[in-house]
Image: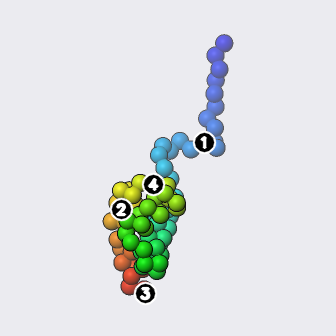
Amino acid sequence: MRFQTQPNPCISTQKGRNAGLLQRRDQKLIRRFYYWFETRRRRLDDVLKILSQDEFFISEGRIMEIIKENDELLNSLYQKN
């Protein structure tokens, strides 16, 4: 006996992570970085640790990559304040 399966419309056929959600995460991370580093005046290593271990649960190296990739947003935050 063979089972025939129908595609489930609730399951996305696209592989990988949702680009829109990653973009929103990165923007939030940049804003949180600015808050801890500029507003709260924490040291860079402390900020990276907070963001990595307490808020976003990604490596400190990846956080630095995200900051570099989103330098325009970070610069705009500096210009506003």
Seen in the picture, residue 54 relative to 44 is either above or below; the reply is above
For marks 2 and 1, give the one nearer the viewer.
Answer: 2
Amino acid type at circle 3 is Asn
Point 33% across, 65% down: residue: 68
The residue indicated by pointer 3 is: 81
- Disc 3 to disc 1, C-alpha distance: 44 Å
Whether label 3 touches label 1, CB < 8 Å: no
- Disc 4 to disc 2, C-alpha distance: 11 Å
Q: Earlier in the sequence, mark 3 or mark 1?
A: 1
Q: Is residue 43 left or right of residue 1?
A: left
Amino acid type at circle 1 is Ile
Label placed on residue 35: none
Amino acid type at circle 4 is Ile
The x, y position of residue 49, in whole percent, is 43, 61
The residue indicated by pointer 1 is: 11
Q: Secondary structure at mark 1?
A: loop
- Disc 1 to disc 4, C-alpha distance: 26 Å
The x, y position of residue 24, in whole percent, is 50, 64
